[in-house]
Amino acid sequence: MGKMERKFSVVGKGAHVKDAREKVTGSLKYAVDMKLQNMAYGKILRCPHPHAKIAKIDTSKAEALPGVLGVLTHEDVPQNDWESAWFNYRGKVLDGIGRFVGDDMAAVAAQTEQIAERALELIEVEYEILPHVLDMEEARKGDAPQIRCEGNERDPYEVKWGDVAKGESEADVTVECDISYESQQYAPLGRNACLAEWMGDKVTLWTSSQTPSELRDGVHEALGIPLSKIRVMALPCGSSFGQWWSNNFMIVTVLLAKKIRQAVKIELSNEECMGTVKRRHLERTRGKMGCTRDGEITVAEIDHIIDNGGYGFKDDVGFFCVDMWGKARNGHYAVHAINTNLLTAGCMRGVGDCTLGASVERLADRLAEKVGMDPVDFRIKNQIVAGDELRMQHSRDNMKGDRDAYIASIPPHLRKDWPELFHLSAGGTRAILEKGAEAFRWKQRWRGWATPNRIDGPKRHGVGVGTGAHVCGVEFEGSSSSMVRINPDGSAKVHCAVGRQGQGSETTQSQVAAEELGLSLDQIEIETGDTDSCPWNHGSLASSTMYRTGWATRAAANDARRQLLEIASREFFDGVDIDELEITDGEVHPKGEPRSNRRFTFAQVLNELRSETLGQTSSITGRPAVPMPPSTTFARQFGAQFAEVEVDIETGQIKLLDFVAVQDSGTVVNPQVLKNQVIGGAICGAGFAIYEHLVFDEETGAIKNANLLDYKLLRCADFPHQAQVLFEEAPDPVGPFGARGAGESPIAAGISAVAQAVHNATGVWVDMPMTPERVIRALAQAH
Amino acid sequence: MATLKVNNRALEVDSRPDRTLADVLRNDLGLIGVRVSCSEGECGSCTVLVDGEPHTSCLMLVNQAEGHEITTIEGIGTTDDLHPIQQAFVEEQGFQCAFCTPGFILSAKAFLAENPNPTADEAAVAMSGNICRCGAYPYIVRSVLNAAEKLRNEAGTQAAE
């Protein structure tokens, strides 16, 4: 694996995140902290039925309550469909139909939150109950109640490669599986709120969002007003992980403010955050995998169903989970996405990885066990490495037609930098598995399949390994842009609408700009939330922030740098070619001579611009000259994790004892930011594996544990604090300074490592989440 | 109205019996570092110190706080003058989104007052009353150990003087 020449001054340095001081002093403002002088308080009326239509709604008693400023119903709302990013929501803001228990039906604005709550009880609604369906397999049937006008099922996402029949005949060993996981909840710490104010015909929204531009687009679609009349001011999010993009309650707030002609704030309660917004998909995976006696996978056949709940519209979850097993010679997979009358499902961190990916890992583990092969060796033998072909549906809309059409759509000057299309750009799991196995001392600790490495009374210890992959830069509805301005004082400001979900992208984007410009990190300011000052951006999602927006930020900084050097050349260096100039520590100097007497600060250069062009702005604005290629799905991030667990076979309790996580995200831009992402992912994955799941009422689908008391999360002492994080940095040919993405692969690897460790400790495969009850049941069944 | 002692100041607050301490601190006194998430005492993000002891202010009525010394995150340090525990959390990056961070820091302050030289295991258990959904736990433990060292050094310097 080639090492890129490393000569970075800001990239790769463990700088403290830019907002660290605000974070530890409690002065960082989230949307819940925003207030306006003339602000009213809003509350949303929620549907008590899984599927029902408003036959009659009488708001007169609510409106008569002193302190009530107005009521918004579906009759006030433009009947336009709007879409959230990645089809996490598709529907109308309010259309008089409730599609799950808790759905938005109407809203009240009042002087105080308490009055608004009382007014909700005074709204008289007569519902026409519609037939409902909660089970996704039932919802696929022809006579099932239809939840959406488009029907309950999306077009399948299907890919075939090689010759499945040949692959089956070549297999010496075959296993089959039928796996279902429960639904994980984002379970955000921190609520969200939206504050909307109209000034004339322009509305401003303050809300915590990872996707400010997509939210502005959503308001535009829902209300039919020009984009220029909408300003989103995205504030930092409490733990979001995909929850706070553009959410329907935000647009309800906009319409409620319009109706009462006054600013309104709607703050969701914890129960509303957990029970009315979205959650992870439920899934069922039926699969078959076969290999030769020496462990080469000859065939993989996977059929995967997910539920979208009421308003999700996704169809393509997780193609990268299957192509991770890149050496499988023949195969077929299909993803079917179905709507049900359950809470909307959407992209939670590791979407696909924690449903399809974790299922394929388990399928592969069972095959490795049957053929008697070490799971590390089995992965090394069968998983993808740079250059391997990717199994994507080539004709997807976002792939712009077939392969030839796709190539034609890439600007010619970029094609030369591009790895072979439809092949993995860089990295793979081999290096991270080897590095992790050594650090964990895997060969010494692993005693064979279904064999504990320690027995202590009823306590069995087991070790496990898991791998995860995720795309880094799939495009959705546009190419993310960034803008970099060099100010007259020599500092610079980045404008990129990626929001702030807490992972540190405001810092890492600033590091990219600083590196390209030759400035220090503290000379960079950044705006990530204001759609009036930032160019359109996909947002901080799909692990694409570093890869796509970082690419754009670097290109914008490069453009600003070029303009600065042109002025410097003209004014101070006798018009030399700008390639003869360099920047070191914020000073322009002749190439290779950082100590030259002829060196000039950015402020000096910009001062020349000011005196020459009186009346013109004396700053420089850089932007990417061309967009990034239309669909850069060829880069992946990889995680390999190793865990040791203790299982008490009398109580069924699982303890996590040790963890080693190795991450390949290409060049590491900020080590501590990346470590936090990796460990955070591992913990969320471990939570998925042993605790976390929503409980739906069997009759109505209502969520019974939409609160942090009944929905259990891992706490500090539940995860080994000595957990190690190691990096493997295979540079990407296109990502900024060789960086790729990070946020999502670690969760998938954690799930599989814990699941396999429990199997090795107990000898049984336990369904996830592996609660004590399920562990005991699985053990009882085995005996 | 009642007088509440918050961050070493006596302040007049509306003390209607249905008001929680968290509500009054956030909404009347503007102490937004008191983060409210679950409202049922489970997550610990609204933790404040009452006479030095950590309490979830979402479950405490403002009347119950009368006559006691209340300390919020705003009372222990500012962006240009961080408390050693805050400095330790910055250095170890014991957070991501940081919604939970003020609660963790105040829990850590109470814990370190009782146990100035904890082991990592003790710190992990002590920090288990608060939830960090981003999962910064190993770095929170390191932050607490780093803070313990800073505080011990500070105490040592003071004793030497």
Image (tube, rainbow, N blue to C red):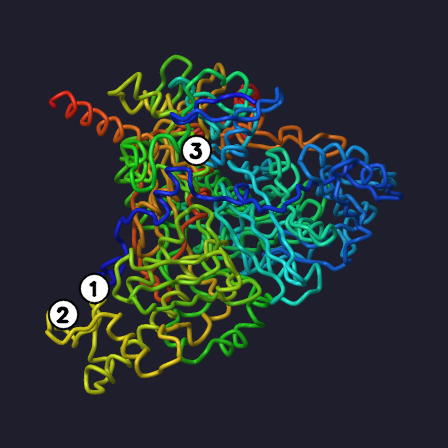
Can residue A321 be seen here? The reply is yes
Q: Chain of mark 3?
A: A
Cα–Cα gap, marks 3 and 1: 46 Å
- Residue that numbered label 3 is attached to: A754
Q: Nearer the viewer, residue A773 or A498?
A: A498
- Residue that numbered label 2 is attached to: A594
Q: Are marks 3 and 2 in contact (CB under 8 Å)?
A: no
Identify the secondary structure beneath mark 2. Answer: loop
The residue at 25%/31% (across/down) is B146
* Sequence-first tag of 3 and 1: 1
The residue at 58%/38% (across/down) is A179
The residue at 38%/43% (across/down) is A22
- Residue that numbered label 1 is attached to: A585
Q: Nearer the viewer, residue A109 or A302?
A: A109
Percent coordinates x, y for residue A466 in the rendering: 41, 41
Percent coordinates x, y for residue A340 in the rendering: 72, 44
Q: Are marks 2 and 1 in contact (CB under 8 Å)?
A: yes
* Amino acid residing under circle 1: Asp
Percent coordinates x, y for residue A597 in the rendering: 10, 74
Residue B111, disc: none
* Amino acid residing under circle 2: Pro
Identify the secondary structure beneath mark 3. Answer: helix
Can residue A173 be seen here? The reply is no
Q: Nearer the viewer, residue B83 or B6?
A: B6
The answer to whether dots 2 and 1 both sit on one chain is yes
Cα–Cα gap, marks 3 and 2: 52 Å
Q: Quadrant of the N terminus of chain A?
A: bottom left
